[in-house]
Amino acid sequence: MPPVPAPPFHWVEAPWGPVLVCAALSPFADHLFSARGLDLPGAQDGAGWEDLGTYLGVAGSAVWRLCQVHGVTVHTDGVAPCDGRWPDGDLLATTRDDVALAIRTADCVPILLVDQTTGAVAAVHAGWRGTAQGAARQMVRAMELRFGSQPADLLAAIGPSIGPDVYEVGQVVIDAFTTAFPEQAGGGRWWAARTGQPGKYLIDLWTATRDQLALAGVPETQVLLAGLCTATHAGVFHSYRAHGAASGRMVAAIRRVGAPR
């Protein structure tokens, strides 16, 4: 049985196995956070992408995706492959209801957002590098600029990713966060704790993501966390930390609920 997530997340059965959904997002968007049943190791077209598109009610080619590079580049228009390669980036957003947005993870933080007023939806891939660059906050700003979204209208669902009890990192990671968020390191709620090993820390990407969304103006009650660690539950989720370079990739995907199909 899959592990129990925090409310309002729950498991539903897809054709390939269980997927996680967030009840708060469901009135506004069809969406999912997959487990090991759907493995999408790359952005190239294939049967898995067709299955995902069918489940969300679009063609596989209408599932926008990216060649993820651990950055904060945002794409909101005309996302399509060029010479067989999807654009580089890690953040996707749209108001269209004829496409779906998808990002892939294997420990990194997947974030799905909906605007309750404009109907805009977004998907964010944020590993430690993206989180240190403020990926969640960058997405909120992009939705404001591109679609007129107000942060107070946004709902954000944070899916399964590596948890704060097991994500051990070194000084390079801590230095990146300290440089990017000196106000947090200097007196705010800090996101890392020392371990018993010299130069080693446990970092909390869940709290960092929630805090960044709050700093961007999203009400804390509208940021929902599944609270499931991919490394702890490596039999259910793909985890780079647990499985190494051979790890597969899960997908977080979202499609705006629009006109009746």
Image (cartoon, rainbow, N blue to C red):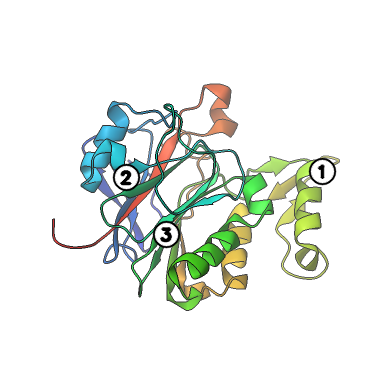
The answer to whether one can see residue 188 in this image is yes
Query: Mark 1 or mark 3, which is nearer the start of the sequence?
Result: 3
3 vs 2, front mark: 2
Name the side, left or right, on which 164 lies relative to 67.
right
> Closer to the camera: disc 3 or disc 1?
1
The answer to which image quadrant residue 206 occupies is bottom right
Rendering coords of residue 251 (x, y %): 40, 41
- Image: 15 above or below 186: above
Amino acid type, label 1: Gln
Image x and y of residue 164, in percent:
62, 50
Question: At which x and y percent is residue 10?
Answer: 32, 55
Q: CA distance from mark 3 to mark 2?
A: 14 Å
SS for dot 3: loop
Residue drawn at x 65%, y 46% as measured from the top left:
128
Circles 3 and 2 in contact, beta carbons < 8 Å: no
Picture disc at residue 19: 2
Q: Nearer the viewer, residue 80 or 184?
A: 80
Secondary structure under the numbered disc 2 in the rendered image: strand
In the rendered image, the vertical position of residue 91 relative to residue 38, given as above or below: below
- Residue that carries the numbered disc 3 in the rendered image: 6
Three-letter residue code for mark 3: Ala
Q: Nearer the viewer, residue 24 or 114?
A: 114
Q: CA distance from mark 1 to mark 2?
A: 35 Å
In contact (CB < 8 Å): disc 3 and disc 1: no
Q: Residues within 10 Å of mark 1 (few under 14, many from 20)?
A: few
Viewer-proximal residue, 46 or 1? 46
Instruction: Give x and y (percent) for residue 186.
Output: 83, 67
Residue displayed at 29% across by 65% down: 28
The residue at 77%/46% (across/down) is: 195
Residue under pointer 1: 171
State how far apart marks 3 and 1 are (Cα): 31 Å
